Amino acid sequence: MRAEPKASAKAERGHLGRWAGTVGKWGLFADVVVFIGRRAGQLWQQGDFTGITLQPGWLVLSGAAYTLGWLPSVWFWR
């Protein structure tokens, strides 16, 4: 029965680099989410929402436009 060869130092550095990259990406994602959440909270506190009305026709139209905007991506990734 043969023993498995040990991983080289280069392979270990590659693994650590991928791990560090993943942690960095998730850290950046968390920073962005926190920044956006804080800014949204500030704007919410300053906002005056008494003049906002929802009109069903515009909601349907915006939903249709949103769906239409996704169609090229759906076609490409199918």
Image (tube, grey):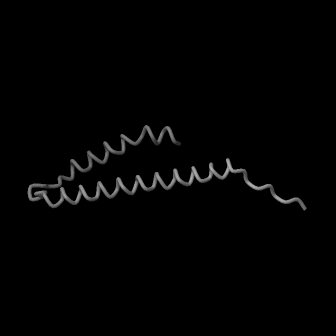
Residue located 41% across and 52% down the image: 28
Which quadrant would the N terminus be assigned to in this image?
A: bottom right
In the image, residue 66 above or below residue 16? above
Q: State the count of labels.
A: 0
| Along the line of sight, the residue nearer the viewer: 74 or 45 | 45
Task: Identify the residue at the far right of this view.
Answer: 1
Locate residue 70, reporting x and y percent. 40, 42
**Residue that lies at the very extreme toward the front in this rendered image:** 9
Task: Pinpoint residue 4: horizontal percent, then vertical percent.
Answer: 81, 58
Q: Residue at x 17, y 55 (%)?
A: 54
Q: Identify the residue at image location x=52%, y=50%.
A: 21
Toward which corner of the image does residue 65 lie, by quadrant? Answer: top left
Looking at the image, residue 2 sits to the left or right of residue 73; the answer is right
Of the pair 52 and 42, the residue shown nearer to us:
42
Q: Position of residue 38 (x, y in %)?
A: 26, 59
In the rendered view, does 75 fall on the left or right side of 59?
A: right
- Residue 49 lies left or right of residue 37; in this view the side is left
- Residue nearest the viewer, comparing 52 with 62: 52
Q: Is residue 50 above or below residue 75?
A: below
Q: Residue at x 49, y 56 (%)?
A: 23
Tell me residue 42's x, y (percent).
Answer: 19, 58
Instruction: Decide which of 41, 69 is in the foreground and name it.
Output: 41
Left or right of residue 65: residue 74:
right
